[in-house]
Amino acid sequence: MPSIPDRVLAAADALADEAVAFASSLIRIPTVNPPGELYAECARFIGDTLAASGFETEYHPADGRPEHTRSHPRLNVVGTRRGRRLHPLVHLNGHFDVVPAGGGWTIDPFGGEVRDGRIWGRGSCDMKAGLAAAVFAAEAIRRAGVELNGTLEISGTVDEESGGFAGVAWLAEQQRLSAARTDYVIIPEPLYVDRICIGHRGVYWFEVETCGRIAHGSMPFHGINAVDHMGIVLDRIRRDLQPRLAGRTTAMPVVPDGARHATLNANGIAGGQAVDGIQTPCVADRCRAVFDRRFLIEEGFDAAKGEILELLDGVARDTDDFKYAIRDLMVVHPTRTPEGSPVVTALDRALHRVLGRSGGLVASPGTYDHKHVARIAGVPHCVAYGPGILDLAHQPDEYCDVSDLMSATKVIALAVLELTGTLPEGKPC
Ligand SMILES: [Zn+2]
């Protein structure tokens, strides 16, 4: 009799066409966010597939969230397949929203085309192939006739691309994902099929407003120009702060290399009169700019914000009549899976078995739903692991290799066997 892992791997090979067809069908449901199109249809489609794979399914609308509206309902789906025991419980989570297609495509972004060994379309890589890997990892285990010693859950959630507040954060706030219930979480985001992603840097979005005084534009010396003052702030950031940030490197394995440093980006700026409108001779009395600061786990939020305040206070000391206000728009703290986490060990072992190698650990340059799992649900043992190349996410002509999808399906299936304690003692896959 072949071993349990061998049976599961053979079952995975046999269902490849179905996994590809499922990913392709998901792409044909254009769940574009914003505004959040066809979420209910997509959640039901995932739910029906989970039900056919022996899962009990529940639907969780994000009641009370302002973005959950009649025209664009926020509907999440969770499937549970209980094994011999409730614990260990492994939860596989994927978001099914996708960013808008944008321009530059040479194929139909929502055609779900399968060609040249690749699945094409918006969301193929980020992350509908990942959802397919999760669902068909579970199906491979079922078809191999293996009953888990623990429980497997799979969720399809909304709005990751816009912060995940009606999705994973919602499930965590409702305790549907919680430390008491959930032992391990794997999020099959596209972070390269041979790597395991252990978290991300922190995010601090803030708005700076410079406040001047209006006067006649022919006599600007009677006013205080807020746009000029913002220019001083931008100049100080470029000459003083950005070089300092570039000199800081995190010990977390953030990819690509440039993102291993602290960064600051100006998202947008507006001041004085609207440039498209009719102009009158006025000194700009107001200017606002929004910034995106990515901070390192070694820096922490307080220091990152303190440095911005220091810079602004420095400008105020050196500049007559400089007045400013600062507003926090969003703070996401850095997240890191604990060292030696069983979820990392299990995936690493499965990678060696399936691919013959492991590319090691990476951390994401951006943020993803890991933060809600760690901070709201309080589940530390969470990673991202899934098919697809990170760099293709949100690009035109996005694709995922079929071979990546099937490798990830197998890796996730083997990791689930190990994490649920389904393999004979002392014989991890
Ligand atoms: Zn994603």
Image (cartoon, rainbow, N blue to C red):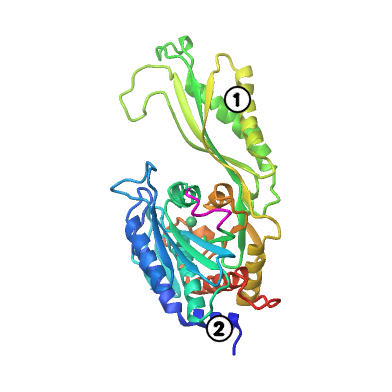
Image location of residue 311, percent across then percent down: 63, 27
Which residue in the protein does label 2 denote? 7
Residue at horizontal 61 percent and vertical 46 percent from the top: 334
Chain part drawn in magenta: 174-181
Residue at the farthest front position: 85
Residue 429, x across and y down, in percent: 65, 76
Q: Is residue 191 visible?
A: yes
Mark 1 residue element: helix
Counting labels gives 2
Judging depth in this view, the residue of 392 and 342 nearest the camera is 342
Q: Disc 2 versus disc 1: distance between alpha carbons?
A: 63 Å
Residue 115 seen in this snapshot: no
Whether 43 is among the magenta residues is no
Q: Is residue 102 above or below residue 223?
A: below
In the rendered view, tell whether residue 229 sits above or below residue 260.
Answer: above
N-term-proximal mark, 2 vs 1: 2
User: Label 1 near label 2: C-beta < 8 Å?
Assistant: no
Residue furthest toward the left? Answer: 71
Q: Amino acid at mark 2?
A: Arg
Foreground: disc 2 or disc 1: 2
Using residue 201 as the reference point, say whether residue 162 is left or right of it.
Answer: left
Q: Is residue 175 magenta?
A: yes
* The residue positioned farthest toward the top in the image shown: 222
Name the residue nearer the viewer: 59 or 402. 59
